[in-house]
């Protein structure tokens, strides 16, 4: 049947075969089979589709999908209003977001995720490898397990390490407080002061500058000095062995026995107790002796 003029149906129109309609206005359309639309379909009310396939552009003011939606090619673009997804969503290709992504629950990513702008994340749980090509700013507490940093780690506030810190390269520490034990197995260079409030054990230590000790220092083994050493109020309970020249600019007090070999005294030698000379005494100037005794065998 072909109609050249307007045709108005106030009831129900049932079509069992092929129908071709041009410029058709339908108040309510129920289709139980397949429908192919080659033109534009404008719907001002609600529409329910069991399966909707579109090879061209499909624009929706509001889209509610109950059993999942599959987008083969061309992508899915939301220009305004945002997209709210309450169920599980699987994306096998790339997801490009130029605005803000807000997730009220857990987001699982099984491949790479690339963020070119700012990302605000409350809780970030990573089970695999994460590569950060730019800055990572954390405003709260961060727990890192088995973390490798190939560049620079800059910490502007306090950092607490509850386990070992292993550094393979150079480390610069400023205003560092260590309440436990600092174990250094290789060479350590200190370009400024080292302040130790407790006991410090140093093994095979080389000091090229000045070692200033304001309190008592106990050396349980040899002390080797290659240059000049200034000692003030020094007590030696064992043996002081000097293999080169030693200059004393003040008094030398010895409470026990002292053996001097090839000793030159340019000033005055005052001996208040008995002195025993087992060899010759040569005096080039004036000598004053009081109560000189000579024993002969």
Image (cartoon, grey):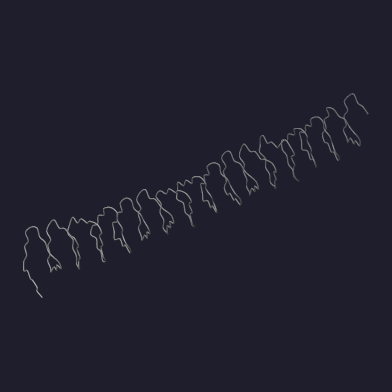
Res. 178 image quadrant: bottom left
Q: Closest to the observer: 40 or 12? A: 40
Q: Residue furthest top?
A: 4
In the rendered image, residue 148, in percent from the top left (x then y), is placed at: 53, 50
In the rendered image, residue 62, in percent from the top left (x then y), is placed at: 72, 38
Q: Residue furthest bottom?
A: 297
In the rendered image, residue 281, in percent from the top left (x then y), is placed at: 12, 63
Left or right of 69 on screen, residue 243: left
In the rendered image, residue 246, in percent from the top left (x then y), is placed at: 22, 56
Res. 76 image quadrant: top right
Compared to 155, does 11 lie above or below? Answer: above
Left or right of 184 on screen, residue 32: right
Quadrant of the image containing the C terminus: bottom left
Res. 200 image quadrant: bottom left
Q: Closest to the observer: 155 or 62? A: 155
Q: Closest to the observer: 231 or 267? A: 267
Left or right of 277 on screen, residue 13: right
Q: Residue furthest right?
A: 1
Quadrant of the image containing the N terminus: top right
Left or right of 137 on screen, residue 110: right
């Amino acid at each position: 049947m072909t109609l050249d003029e307007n045709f108005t149906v106030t009831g129900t129109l049932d079509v069992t075969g092929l129908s071709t309609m041009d410029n058709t206005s339908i108040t309510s359309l129920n289709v139980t089979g397949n429908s192919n639309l080659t033109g534009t379909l404008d719907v001002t009310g609600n529409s329910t589709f069991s399966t909707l396939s579109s090879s061209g552009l499909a624009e929706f003011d509001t889209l509610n999908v109950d059993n999942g939606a599959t987008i083969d090619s061309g992508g899915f673009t939301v220009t305004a209003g945002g997209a709210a997804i309450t169920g599980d969503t699987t994306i096998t290709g790339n997801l490009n977001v130029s605005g803000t992504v807000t997730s009220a629950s857990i987001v699982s990513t099984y491949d790479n995720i690339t963020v070119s702008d700012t990302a605000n994340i409350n809780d970030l749980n990573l089970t695999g490898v994460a590569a950060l090509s730019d800055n990572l700013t954390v405003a709260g507490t961060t727990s890192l397990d088995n973390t490798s940093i190939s560049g620079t780690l800059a910490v502007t506030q306090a950092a607490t390490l509850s386990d070992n810190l292993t550094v393979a390269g150079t480390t610069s520490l400023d205003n560092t407080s260590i309440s436990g034990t600092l174990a250094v197995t290789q060479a350590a260079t200190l370009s400024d002061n080292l302040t130790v409030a407790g006991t410090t054990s140093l093994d095979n230590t080389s000091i090229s500058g000045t070692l200033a000790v304001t309190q008592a220092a106990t050396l349980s083994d040899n002390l080797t000095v290659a240059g000049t050493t200034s000692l003030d109020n020094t007590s030696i309970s064992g043996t002081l062995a000097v293999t080169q020249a030693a200059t004393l600019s003040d008094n030398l007090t010895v409470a026990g026995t002292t053996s001097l070999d090839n000793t030159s005294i340019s000033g005055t030698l005052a001996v208040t107790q008995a002195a025993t000379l087992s060899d010759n005494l040569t005096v080039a100037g004036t000598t004053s002796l009081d109560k000189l005794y000579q024993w002969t065998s």
